[in-house]
Image (cartoon, rainbow, N blue to C red):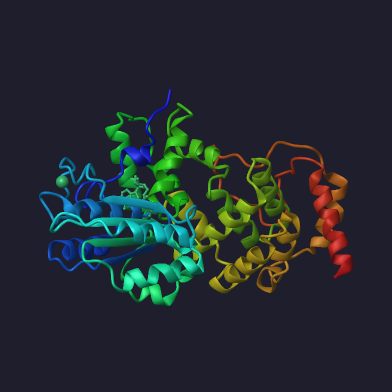
Amino acid sequence: MTTVALNKKYRPQDFKNGFVGQEYTAKMIDNALTQGKLSNAILLSGERGGGKTTTARIIAKGLNCEQGPTSTPCGKCAYCTDQLMLINEIDAASNRGVEEVRNIKESLKYSTQEGKYKVYIIDEVHMMTKEAFNALLKTLEEPPSNVVFILCTTDPEKLPATIISRTQHFKFGKIPVEKIMSHLKEILEKEGITDFTTDALRVIAEHANGGMRDSLTLLEQCLLLNEELNAENVYKVIGTVDHTLYLKLLLGMNNNNFEYTLALAKDIIYKGVQPKYFYKDFLATITNVILRKIYTSHDKEIVSQLKNLNTNTLLQVSDILQRDMKEGFIELTMIKLFQIDSIKSLRKTDIKEVVSKKEETVSPQQPIVNESSATTEVPESKTEIQPKDNEIVHSLLAFKVFSALA
Ligand SMILES: Nc1ncnc2c1ncn2[C@@H]1O[C@H](COP(=O)(O)OP(=O)(O)O)[C@@H](O)[C@H]1O
Ligand SMILES: [Mg+2]
Ligand SMILES: [Zn+2]
């Protein structure tokens, strides 16, 4: 059994119904369409899943619609349903060459009915070869009056300036988290799904990073669990953990508790988070702390305790995280973080002492991460929290090697 993917099922057919964000771009296109000011060569650029292809199709239909030109095409007439085959979609990722442009030029010879347009939507246009661009350039310079080119790209930087300067350029930004959330909520309601939490939608929307398609794909994946759509389940599907845990890493640093911080970092990894995502998510959390983008009252409480970590220190922490991201040796990263001067100055004992003490006392214990008892208490120096297994000894030994080399 197959079903239509949510992102296809809910592709907006016009700018009025279900088209989210991109207000200014949509308004400009709407005005250009209805006032006859649309150019024959249009460029739509922006991050993936923000509505470029959707918009290209709205323009293509809206130009020829029997009710048009309009940005709310009727969706029913012969032009909207493309029975006259005036809309051509070309994926430049797989048709990159000069041959493709030649085929387009060949098809331009056939004229259309008075006042109607042949529309060429060229997706991922930055993938075209240099020769193909050159061939296209001439056509863009003097396009036949009944032809409209809509070029879409996630990477306008890769386009020759000569192409860009010949187009009417519309930019698509990231869609704000709140708008993605309410769009997802609307879709869930239309699908008759009621057991979801707002937190889950927020985690999905944040993970999608401004792209509606990614948010819908993730939502669909989460629904496959057939359980309540809550934040915890979304984290599982993404392969990440509650961002509060990253705040707790900061708290561990703020309280200069190396053992706690290292054990917590390792526990996040044990939960199945890939090292690359550990760095990414930790960096995202730090950015949110710096920008004061904190949502829950529990998180706010943790952040209010981070008095020893000013913005400058947090920026130093992010520098180290960014540098270490490629290698992914989390233990070494943690050690480096505790070497930052402002954090080091808080230290009562040397990490080396912690190292030798731990070697004697390490024993396999419970995992330290316990989301249900979300406590913000991090002991200042000694901690009851025990590392999960002997791996911590290895990390601490790694530190010994590290400090011997230093
Ligand atoms: N601005 C938007 N409003 C509502 N849904 C959107 C928006 N942008 C994208 N989508 C959803 O994501 C899917 C893919 O969008 P698309 O226009 O193909 O993105 P792009 O071409 O920018 O990568 C659409 O089918 C739609 O479901
Ligand atoms: Mg697209
Ligand atoms: Zn129509």
Measured along the vertical axis of the image, is residue 156 above or below residue 176?
A: below
Q: Nearer the viewer, residue 17 or 387?
A: 17
Kindly identify the residue that appears in the image at 69 percent across and 70 percent down: 340
Residue 49 visible to the viewer = no
Say which residue appears at 75% left-offset and 55% top-offset.
331
Q: Nearer the viewer, residue 297 or 403?
A: 403
Looking at the rendered image, the quarter that the N terminus falls into is top left
Relative horizontal placement of residue 62, taking residue 205 as reference (left or right)? left
Whether residue 117 is visible = yes
When asked about the image quadrant of residue 30, the answer is bottom left
Q: Position of residue 256 (x, y in %)?
A: 68, 61
| Residue 56 x, y percent position in the rendering | 30, 55
Q: Residue furthest top?
A: 1
Indicate the position of residue 68 as horizontal and vertical percent values: 12, 54
Which residue is found at the position 70% from the left and 72% from the top?
A: 345
State the residue in front, 170 or 167: 167
- Residue lying at the far left in this picture: please name it: 67
Frontmost residue, 290 versus 89 = 89
**Left or right of 174, for residue 310:** right
**In the shown orientation, is residue 395 left or right of residue 220?**
right
User: How many labels sit on residues?
Assistant: 0
* Position of the C terminus by quadrant: bottom right
